[in-house]
Image (cartoon, rainbow, N blue to C red):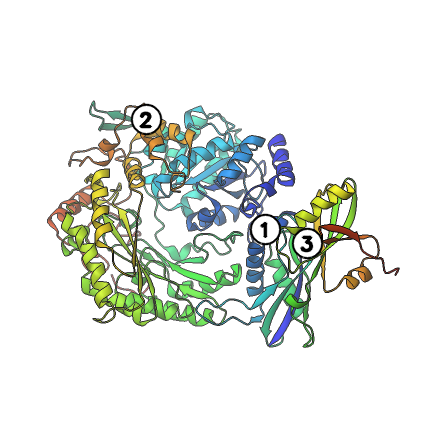
Amino acid sequence: MGDGVDSVSTFFKRDIGLVSKPGRYLGIEVNARHKPLSTPGTNCVLVYPDVYEIGMSHLGLAILYEEINDREDSMADRAYLPWVDMQELMERKGIPLFGLESRVPLGLFDLVGITLQHELTYANVLRILSLAGIPLRSAERRDSDPLVVGGGPGAYNPEPVADFFDFLVLGEGEEVIHEILDAVREWKHMGKKDRRGFLRRCASIPGVYVPSLYRVHYRPDGTVSGIEPLEGAPLPVHKRVVPDLNEKVKPRRPPVPLVESVHDRCSLEIFRGCTRGCRFCQAGMVYRPVRERSEDLLHGWGRELVSATGCDELSLSSLSSADYTRINSLAERLSEDLERKGVAVSLPSLRTDSFSVELASRVGRIRKTGLTLAPEVASPRLRAVINKELSDRDLLEAVGAAYREGWRKMKLYFMVGLPGEEEGDVEAICGLVRRIMREGDGGGPPRGLRLSVSVSTFVPKPHTPFQWARQISLPETARRHFILKEGLRIKGVTWKWHTREMSYLEGVLARGDRRLGPVVEAAAREGCLDNWSEFFSWERWRRALEGYGLDPAWYVERERGEEEIFPWEHLSAGVKKSFLWEEYLKALRGEPTPDCRFADCTDCGACDGKEIVNRLAGGGR
Amino acid sequence: MKRLLVKYYKKGDAAFLSHRETMRVLERALRRSGADLVFTSGFHPRVKMSFSPALPLGVAAEAEYLEAAVEGEPDLEEMIKRMNDALPEGMGVTSLQVMPGYMPKLSRWARYGLYRVEGGGGALHLCMRLDGEGGGRLRDALQLLKERLGVEAEAVTRVGIYASRDEILEENPGKVYFYHAGKGELEEMEDSGAG
């Protein structure tokens, strides 16, 4: 490991002071493990393909970091996408992207693990590989190159970036990582020969998807006609699920960001999965079933996290934290213990009802910065479409409760472009906001309330009931934004919208196929950081799509039929396609599907009826 | 309530932590020190503490200060140990003392900074005021050193913080250049003749 490492260390001596916020690149975080790379061991680097401030807040990688570093035969370092000034300086000085703690170039690790959290980070993935000097395509990598491994929700349809990964992991990583590390260790002991044979061996590990072992066939119209597994690869690849989360208690000592990060707090993951069944929500489909951790375990673990990090906020995280069956008691116990230490307990994902607001207020006694509620839509008809049970009254009561508890800044999230949406449904958002400003304080106007309305464009996601639906076009989105712009001129209300073209690109990539690989590569050559509006350029992507003869509208605006073979047909998130199709039809009819925690099983396919089932801390179904 | 004076250093890579980032890691270390901290009141309570004046990015420090308020009888030895376990590589607490009642606040006495400037195979000492005339001044002083003495700074370390110039001369016999920002001049500080 000669040159690369030496030049990185010279770079730190001479040049690190030239970049903005060098704290992002130092790797001296409290709780960083600093395990050295070793020849017999398996050397991993975990990469978040966005900047440090975002990547350091990510819980999934913190879990894997600890799983890997707790093994004697393995180590894990961390890397993020450097900010643009650092990227330029590194390129000018010929410094390859390196692991933060070891300062060893990524190309010298055995395994480079990259999480796919969002479509708009796909160009960043390629940027990271090219900064590291690792061949972009799996097919171009030699035996001595690292294994490039993907994971995270993007792995449920990684097809637009499938060519760049040696393999991906579907589902939860804390068990399968050990099976992978065992396989890599064995391969390394054998001298890292026959990379393809090794990938074939990996494909036999449940949850591991090796894209090069599947051939995709297309019809002349561009739809998939079939996906053919090669050399005995499994069909489909099933996601991994940890049945009992009480047996997986990590992270215990996560590295603490040196530079202020987007979620500057410690996360205590109270449960995984959500069965509310909102039809647009990919997380609610793919993370099933619901698995709550025990209250006593969480109580002790939460206090441990605070004392291991010195953080001033403990966030009770999950997809819908007020749903945790023992939430009242857990939140009370933790806030009682932690309040004296100046540590706030917070609930990041609130339900839109007064129960949640009152709960948030009780536990968050010492901090009231802002409250976020997500009604998503404003008309009863669309609520039935998305299966989100909520009335104007619930929302008004939630706002009223928050107002009484002292909140003067609130944020509401809405979506436009849902299946079956009409102009009246968009106008209903304005009407609802007006009503809040008129009657939000128990029938009267909530004086001094500042309401921020945030509007995103609905993007249909794979493995959801809306995977067949069309996404609205750019002009249709502009029309909706115009209605909102006119209708939300209300004193005390500000509104923000997602950049239309960003949602459009997200739509192309979310349901994209492998033909987009070269497009992503071309777009990434000219730029990255697409989720940063100052760097996003639809033009760059439009040109790249055109260059390969692909029409973005075909991916985004086309409603798929029942018989459509999806590009992700060979990947299973547990929930059955037939269930999702039924849900789609019910959505179009406006019929509800109850939550299986409180009503009958919906036979969605996520449980196995034995080990993998809903597990609630407070008992019950 | 007692006032604690924490003396710490920051060197190596940690010199590239900004003032804000340094405050964050010190606050977290204090929270982990086992002491019964005093918090500010209001919606967003913070640990009650204050710091010696900001160091420019990249400048190491041998003796910086932090003042914090605690309740009860703190176990100082234990606090030092725990804080050192909770600080990033390159930072550490060297001493911790209960401030006597007559001792002025940190912001009152932290007036002069003494810097060791290494370059061209040698080292010299530079002193300047920390309060008053605004930021960016260390850079000006280094520029002047280059112009007047031909010394190109390769590494700069703040070795201490003092209340008066006399205090510096008492502790640091030898030649010290004083940067007079108002006049834009370097002057040699008088050696008190001790030692």
Q: Please name which of the two marks, 1 or 2, marks the residue nearer to the observer.
A: 1
* Marked residue chain, label 3: B
Please tell me if label 2 and label 3 are on a single chain.
no
Answer whether residue A324 is visible to the viewer in this image.
Answer: no
Answer whether residue A527 is visible to the viewer in this image.
Answer: yes
Q: Residue at x 21, y 57 (%)?
A: A595
**N-term-proximal mark, 1 vs 3:** 1
Residue topped by disc 2: A230
Along the horizontal axis of the image, is A619 left or right of B98?
A: left
Q: Residue at x 56, y 71 (%)?
A: B37
Residue type (three-letter) at the residue carrying disc 1: Leu
Query: Gap in Å between the C-alphas at discs 1 and 3?
Result: 12 Å
Residue topped by disc 1: B17
Q: Which dot marks residue A574?
A: none
Q: Please name which of the two marks, 2 or 3, marks the residue nearer to the observer.
A: 3
Residue topped by disc 3: B61
Q: In terms of depth relative to the viewer, which is nearer, A531 or A76?
A: A531
Q: Residue at x 74, y 45 (%)?
A: B145
Asked if labels 3 and 1 touch by Cβ distance under 8 angstroms, the answer is no
Please tell me if label 1 and label 3 are on a single chain.
yes
Q: In terms of depth relative to the viewer, which is nearer, B101 or A274?
A: B101
Q: Position of residue A82 (x, y in %)?
A: 50, 40
Please tell me if label 1 and label 2 are on a single chain.
no
Query: Gap in Å between the C-alphas at discs 2 and 3?
Result: 61 Å
